[in-house]
Amino acid sequence: MSVFRLTVNGRAHTVDVDPATPLLYVLSDDLELRGPKFGCGLGQCGACTVIVKGEAVRSCSVPIQSVAGAEITTLEGLGSPENPHPIQEAFIDKQAAQCGFCLSGVMMTAKALLDRTPNATDAQIRQALSNVLCRCGAHVRMMAAIKQYQQERQGRRTA
Amino acid sequence: MISFMTSMTPDAKDALAAAGLSRRDFVRRSGALIVAFSAARLAGDLGLAPGAVSAQGINGPGNPQLDAWIAIGTDGRVTAYTGKCELGQGLYTAQTQLIAEELCVPIERVTLIQCDTSMTPDQGTTSGAQSHPSNFNQSNLALAGATAREALVQMAAQRLGAPAEQLVAADGAVSVRGDASRRVAYGELIGGRTFAVTLNRNARRKPAGEWTVLGTPVPRLDIPAMATGRFEYVHNVRVPGMLHGRVVRPPALGATLTSIDEASVTGLPGVVKVVVRKNFVGVVAEKPWQADQAARQLKVVWSAGTTLPDQRTFHQHLRSQTATRDTLSVDSGDVDGTLAGAARVVRATYLHPYQMHASIGTACAVADVRGGGATIFSASQAVYPLRSTMATMLGLKPDTIRIVFRMGPGCYGVNGADTVSYDAALLSQAVGRPVRVQLTRKDEMAWENYGPAYVIEQRVGLNTDGTIACWDYEGWSLSRGGRPGYNAPGNVVTGMLAGFQPGGVQPRSPAPRPSGEYDNGNNTVPSYVTGTIGDARGGTGAIRSERVLSHVIESPFFTGPLRSPARLQNTFAHESFMDEIAATVKADPVEYRLRHLRDPRLREVLTAATRKAGWEARPSPRAGIRRSGVVSGRGVACVLYEGDNGYCTLVADVDVNQDTGLVLVKRCVVAIDCGPISNPDGLRNQVEGGLIHGISRSLREEVTWNGDRVTSIDWRTYRPWFVGDPIPVIESVLINRPDAATMGAGETSITVTAAAIGNAIFDATGARVRQLPFTPERVKAALAANRAG
């Protein structure tokens, strides 16, 4: 066991865990966060995605020791039901979910891409989501929500 | 703790608590309601072998007491109790709309409690597209709403001294029509007390023409919490003192436990206990990562597995079995003669693989089995059936067990939700503390109850004018286990490992003559025949000479209902074959279908979709097909789902790259008629999801195995349609029928997807692919065969 400090959604935490513990386990079980989900534990589906230093990271496949001290953002760190982040607002507006279990994967991956590449083409967005799974088939609405967020974001930048 | 209670007012919580206490008296199996579905239908929906149907059936007994369904607090808040749950299909919102509508209260004042054996009626299983038929027609939840409204109006008549006919219910109160000063709120009439009346079968539902909440696109009530990471899935349930368990499944099918070396994990951090029950093995630890490590390091010796039939020749294996259970759905008795006298006979064989649910999150449950009772948080579709089988597993009485539904990842049938509930309960019972179990990806995928493979041989005899004189269907499929129902815990892997036998197949050959009421619950009978049994015609078509014979054999893998179970496989074979016959006689596929269809609503979805799609009437394949490069085509397929539960037609436009064999679905136009529409946007969402899921299953999904084990164990070896994969433009035509009975919708569009795509591939290329999924290799092989032929 080792003590690690990490900042999650702007709040500092200290945990005492096995250094090999996946970041997802710390977020879900030690910090009881609900955004990142266990989908496969293999980094293949994206359900556990969080943002670390601007990058979409699959928290199931990252040991806590490799992100010690990092600032981490999870889905609940973006906004709340009362005050949603614009990408969350777009997904709510488009009703872009069925079971909702994949939303961390889809939204955090799309947000990281568009933060880095605001004018990403549709092909780039698809590429970024090529290893993000939604099993209920909300794909069409999700792509529409991401486009709405992109346009809203571009509007803010030029305003 | 309880996701939806966080948004409740204190008063509503009190009302719930108060109602919950008295509710226990009501919530017990009354067995009073008549289940209106045949045994064959129930067997299909429960995923059981024929003959293994529990009496309660798919929809459970319900409850005749109004107080079992609805409670009203002193603050006027309405709490409704339902036995049909949210699985991602939008049912939580639609049921909340239903109660708001029937009780004439704003939707914000309704709280819906789903599937908790301590509170809600026993409505069996949320499956088989039965939630709308059972809860939105003149029964169960809808009837409770109407009964409650009428009871409130009667109470108000006494209170206000006015005849009931002059009263109107609105905004949570009853008032005298035209005199708003004479008004009494629901809370004053009944708040905190029980109705103490039974459901009134004649209670007047609000006509769909008067709806203001139901029938409108109310946004999903749960999506804001989901999109902001606040929603509580079963994975997020945390209870005090909770430990974490992991299971250790056998490495191969048929392998049994030989020995276990508990010392191999002694001293590992956090390990609490190694648990063994017959062939069930699990470990419990303080933290999930510790449980992972212990499960990986535990030394277990298993016997050799059972060698599986070779996958490459599996369909021949299936086709050649003799220990089969045979069923004739229809048999006019004259098919052989009609075939012999036909101007022409057309035949084709269609093959379907095993496919899996492969929910995006692995199954999870939290169980607390202590002191002669149990509380289990589960994403099961079937809380009461699970309580019953859990009692068998744990050696407890059912009424000491509480199963509480918490939503899991998208559910398309019997995924791992039931089996992991057993896992958690067995481990909790062994350690005497609450235990949370989440499966690994491999454990879930290798041991799921798969949707079964099929071989379907079709023959028709044609008249000289090109119409169909007779239709002869013969199908082979497999079964093992299925939904546990109320009495068969061995139907899923944990139950079997713990010593309970999975339901098998009892051979029966030849099939008995068809008798009783016509039932097309599995869509085994094509839409184009009359469906005649005795003097009654139950089918939707015109062909009078008809025979539909099914064989079921024992499956090497667990099987169970997977979204559109059997209906998808059968509809793929029927609608592909209808297209082949139309091509044989050089007829337009739509016109040719209409020539053989009698049902006006099925005809209407067919014409509505093709009109919207701009369908050009001509035979397939299209003329002048280039022999290489990318070519385009269109295909159509239609169905009356389950023979009585939702009409749907899909027109698919595809591109086929003849060099790579890749199929790109460009546009999908769907027409759907499921009676009065509860929520148009919710319906569209279901139609779209069904199509994408259907594209995934049509083009990619196939369970693979080798030797004695399944080799589809992660997202590389079982590859569905990812978010970045190409998606079609989807256009939905929603046909609303306010005066018709409400039907299911969630499994309609997926049912027609494979056939429409296959027909479009044929239209584009002239090559017919008769085996799913339509992988590039199979498409290229069909192209080569077409050129050679």
Image (cartoon, rainbow, N blue to C red):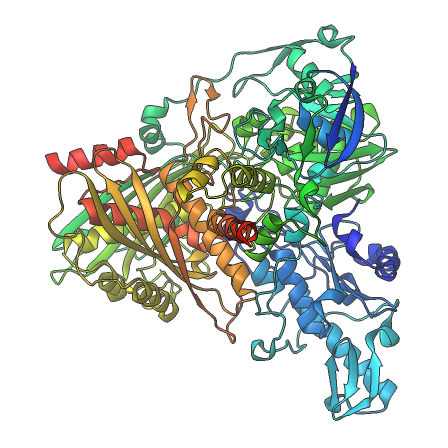
Left or right of residue B186: residue B512: left
Q: Nearer the viewer, residue B473 or B607?
A: B607
Residue found at x 31% / y 47% = B757
Q: Quadrant of residue B315?
A: top left
Q: Nearer the viewer, residue B207 or A9?
A: A9
Left or right of residue B607: residue A95: right
Q: Is residue B211 above or below residue A17?
A: below
Q: Is residue B732 above or below residue B496?
A: below
Q: Is residue A3 above or below residue B764?
A: above
Q: Quadrant of residue B396?
A: top right
Residue found at x 10% / y 49% = B624
Quarter of the picture holding the N terminus of chain B:
top right
Q: Nearer the viewer, residue B445 or B718?
A: B718
Q: Quadrant of residue B733?
A: bottom left
Residue A152 in the image: state x and y as whole percent. 54, 53
Residue found at x 74% / y 45% = B404
Q: Nearer the viewer, residue B645 or B468?
A: B645
Quarter of the picture holding the C terminus of chain B:
top left
Residue B522 in the image: state x and y as whole percent. 44, 51
